[in-house]
Amino acid sequence: MNIKSSSKLPLRQWLVLGLLLLLLFATDSYAMYAVFSSRFPGAADFFPRWFGGRALLLEGRNPYDREVALEAQLGLFGRYTEPWEDQVAFAYPLYTLFLFWPLIYTPYAVAQAAWMVFLQFGLIFGTVLSLKWVNWKMASWLLVLTMLWAVFFYPGARSIILGQFAVVVFGFFAAALFALKQRWDYAAGACLALATIKPQMVFMLIPFLLLWALTHHRWRVIIGFGGGLLFLTITAMLLVPTWLQDFYRGLFAYSDYVGFYSPIENLTRTFAAPIAIPLANGLSVLLIGLMVFAWGQVWLKKPGWFVYALMLTLIIGNLVAFRSATTNHVILYLPLLLWFRRISQLGDGGNLVVFFVQIGLNLLLWFVFLKFIIGTNFEHPFMHGFLPLLLLLLYLADWRGLFAVAQKIEAGA
């Protein structure tokens, strides 16, 4: 994984490109505000973080305090929530607010619009970096359609609507992989540290990448991660010295009212209720065993196994996580794009097949969502494991073909 890009733009072109992107962002944000956020307050996953940030920076209050959460409940729902409902707590590491600090000083409708557009850009940014990481030079028409797919694909679109930070994690993780490929190891480690804003998305990925860095003596990755995490932690402590214990206490409280099981248990409770728990436990052990086997091959430095084991870790992590959601599945764009590359190589019409697969997969997820939401107003919990289960079956059924692609990626082909 030491292939470097040969294309370099002059500084002037980078500046022009940056100004164009800034103009596009501002225009898109204004349109989002005028058409949507000024009329329909939403982005319910962003509001508690924004509200808590304002409580801290404008009023000097601890965003993790119960009183702040109660005020946020009134702001979001117009009432206090029941114990089993979302408590609208800050519930994230305090350094998360560094990502949207300027928006704290704006009215919520403006902040919501800018954040939703930021997530649109984040999905495209993460997808572009992921395509570079899998060494896939798409046809121009397919690249444009894939950018649109990234925004409108069910996990991405739902993340934008909810204002979910999962997109930010995906962007930082894709940036970390791209930085590893370029051998920008300090930057790679720092990006991994920033990806910890949602620990449940990276609790298996970070140990895996640190293991890989250890086996390849890429010490700067480990230093970058450790130093970055330490910097974020200490900087946040300057704002709220007790934030670490406040955050962990909030995690336990969150598990009490979230009301869902692990994705794999949600699947077994849907399709095999009488034996749901033992079946979920048995499958989890098998999947973790498969992942550990793949990690062992990486430890032995066997060609192709780094990429393939990373894909398995992404998929299995989204099945056995203590808590997941379909918004977290944006990080599965990586194994999806690798699979799309595999499909594109099947023949002369491979790119067209990829296009139709993208449409079909998106329609399938939206259909399942709409079928089960009718009459409940809630996403069915089994969807938390639906996409990763599909990907797991694909990666096991076509492991030879996908492993061959993984070997090409590691070889820079």
Image: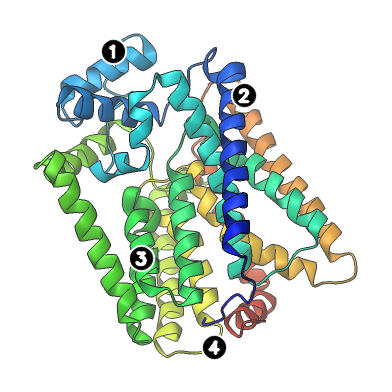
Numbered disc 1: secondary structure = loop
Residue farthest toward the front in the current orientation of the protein: 12
**Which of 223/15 is in front?**
15
Badge number at residue 80? 1
Instruction: Work out whether residue 343 can be spotted.
Output: yes
Give whichever of discs 2 and 1 has the lower sequence position. 2
Give whichever of discs 3 and 2 has the lower sequence position. 2
Callouts 3 and 1 close, C-beta under 8 Å: no
Q: What amino acid does circle 1 point to?
A: Tyr
Q: What amino acid does circle 4 point to?
A: Pro
Residue 163 position, x and y percent, is 47, 33
Residue 230 position, x and y percent, is 19, 59
Q: Which residue is mark 4?
A: 303
The answer to whether 191 appears left or right of 369 in the picture is: left
Badge number at residue 31? 2
Q: What amino acid does circle 3 point to?
A: Ile
The answer to whether 148 appears left or right of 186 in the picture is: right
Residue under the point 56% across and 41% down = 22
The answer to whether 399 appears left or right of 182 in the picture is: right
Residue farthest toward the right in the current orientation of the protein: 348
Give whichever of discs 3 and 1 has the lower sequence position. 1
Q: Quadrant of residue 342?
A: bottom right
Quadrant of the frame with the C terminus: bottom right
Give whichever of discs 4 and 3 has the lower sequence position. 3
Give whichever of discs 1 and 4 has the lower sequence position. 1
Callouts 3 and 2 close, C-beta under 8 Å: no
**Which of 182/202 is in front?**
182
Q: What amino acid does circle 2 point to?
A: Ala
Numbered disc 3: secondary structure = helix
The answer to whether 120 appears left or right of 235 in the picture is: right
**Which of the two marks, 4 or 2, is nearer to us in this view?**
2
